[in-house]
Image (cartoon, helix red, strand yellow):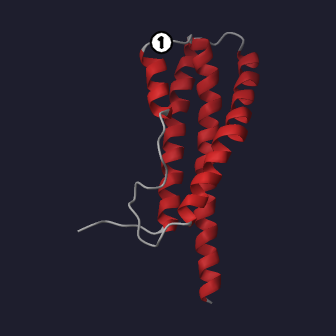
Amino acid sequence: MEFRVNRRTLLLIAGCVWIIAGINILRIGIITWLNDAHYWLFKVGEAIVVFLLFFQFVFRRLFVKHSERISQKGEKNCPFSFFDVKGWITFGVTIRHFQLLPNSFISVFYTGLSSALIITGILFLIRAYSSSRHKLKSNS
């Protein structure tokens, strides 16, 4: 017995996974930030820059790529086929495990990065919602 989901469910799963990943990274960023609270106003500015760069040049493009790929899929899909992992998780885990970057950088970077992940997850949820509304209108 195979468990399959439709395209809308894939979008919902993608949104939830991206938001959960973003929240987890935000948690790490906040914990690191609390341990090194010097120059907090400067760090807020840096975190905003990281967010804007990652959202605009990485995550927004991934959202479009994966949303388009999902829209081309059939009606029954593997629930894990919403996106293809290419080492982002491995890269982040390696940096944290070997402490390759100072905590002052991690706090700013993770805060900005997590915000971009969360916003991208929200975009997937919005796309899933709008696709269900479009389907309802076409059935009427």
Which residue in the structure is indicated by mark 1?
Answer: 99
* Image quarter in which the C terminus is found: bottom right
Query: Quadrant of the rendered structure where residue 130 is?
Result: bottom right
Q: How many numbered tags mark residues here?
A: 1
* Image quarter in which the N terminus is found: bottom left
**Residue in the picture at 60% in, 81% down:** 136
Please determine whether, in this image, residue 61 is positioned above or below residue 37: below
- Binning the other alpha carbons within 10 Å of mark 1 as few (below 14), some (14 to 19) or many (20 upward) gives few
**Farthest residue, direction bottom:** 140
Nearer to me, 111 or 85: 85
Nearer to me, 53 or 39: 53
**Farthest residue, direction left:** 1
Residue 33 in sight in this render: no
Residue 136 in sight in this render: yes
Q: Of helix, strand and loop, which one carries label 1?
A: loop
User: Given the image, on which type of amino acid does mark 1 rest?
Assistant: Gln
Please determine whether, in this image, residue 122 is positioned above or below residue 91: below
Query: Quadrant of the rendered structure where residue 132 is?
Result: bottom right
Please determine whether, in this image, residue 89 is positioned above or below residue 62: above
**Residue in the picture at 76% in, 18% down:** 41
Instruction: Name the spot of residue 85 as percent of width and height, x first.
Output: 47, 42
Side of 15 relative to 126 (left or right):
left
Instruction: Name the spot of residue 4 as percent of width and height, x first.
Output: 36, 67
Nearer to me, 23 or 89: 89
Instruction: Name the spot of residue 105 as percent of width and height, x first.
Output: 62, 16
Please determine whether, in this image, residue 77 is positioned above or below residue 99: below
Nearer to me, 38 or 2: 2
**Residue in the picture at 54% in, 45% down:** 19
Instruction: Name the spot of residue 60 as percent of width and height, x first.
Output: 67, 46
Side of 11 relative to 76 (left or right):
right
Side of 4 relative to 54 (left or right):
left
